[in-house]
């Protein structure tokens, strides 16, 4: 008799191993100037580029960058905000940075464009 649950689990882990072994991380992030240690936030993080809500406490500066479109970079930015316990991000800058690389095989140089999003992560008390 075939155990379908074990078969599905094995297929899932095989697919996961295949995806993680060949996947290149296209988006990265970091948090700096962390002013307050808060627990990981698991709720929805709001993102705005215009205003900061009244009573918001700044927790950190967050930055995300990648070789991809704006949506994955902003998603990474919100994940980084969550990791420092923030529930709101004010986007302060979006720009393209060019990195110069040298190929070791033929010593030629090429530029690689990176989309960068910088913001401040805040904790905003929810109104009850």
Image (tube, rainbow, N blue to C red):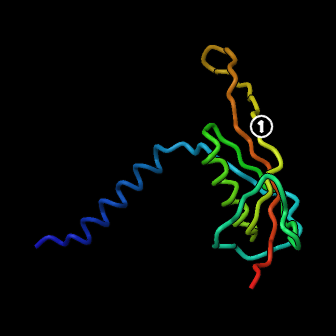
Q: Position of residue 50 (x, y in %)?
A: 82, 53
Q: Which residue is mark 1?
A: 95
SS for tag 1? strand
Q: Is residue 52 left or right of residue 30?
A: right
Q: State the residue in front, 60 or 24.
A: 60
Q: Is residue 123 left or right of residue 74?
A: right
Q: Identify the residue at image location x=81%, y=44%.
A: 93
Q: Quadrant of the C terminus?
A: bottom right
**Which of the 4 image quarters holds residue 14?**
bottom left
Q: State the residue in front, 88 or 63.
A: 88
Q: Position of residue 24 (x, y in %)?
A: 54, 42
Q: Is residue 128 above or below residue 22?
A: below
Q: Position of residue 83 (x, y in %)?
A: 70, 66
Q: Identify the residue at image location x=83%, y=58%.
A: 120
Q: Is residue 94 left or right of residue 107?
A: right
Q: Is residue 24 left or right of residue 27?
A: left
Extreme residue toward the bottom, this view: 128
Q: Position of residue 29 (x, y in %)?
A: 71, 51
Q: Identify the residue at image location x=75%, y=79%.
A: 126
Q: Quadrant of the N terminus?
A: bottom left
**Which of the 4 image quarters holds residue 62?**
bottom right
Q: Identify the residue at image location x=76%, y=68%.
A: 86
């Amino acid at each position: 008799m075939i155990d379908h649950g074990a078969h599905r689990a094995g297929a899932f882990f095989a697919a996961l191993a295949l995806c993680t072994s060949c996947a290149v991380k296209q988006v990265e992030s970091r948090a700096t100037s962390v002013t307050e240690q808060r627990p990981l936030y698991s709720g929805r993080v709001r993102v705005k580029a215009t205003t900061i809500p009244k009573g918001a406490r700044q927790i950190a500066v967050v930055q995300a960058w990648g070789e991809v479109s704006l949506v994955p970079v902003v998603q990474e930015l919100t994940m980084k905000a969550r990791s420092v316990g923030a529930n709101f991000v004010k986007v302060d800058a979006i720009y393209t940075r060019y990195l110069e690389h040298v190929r070791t095989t033929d010593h030629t140089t090429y530029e690689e464009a990176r989309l960068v999003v910088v913001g401040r992560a805040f904790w905003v008390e929810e109104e009850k």
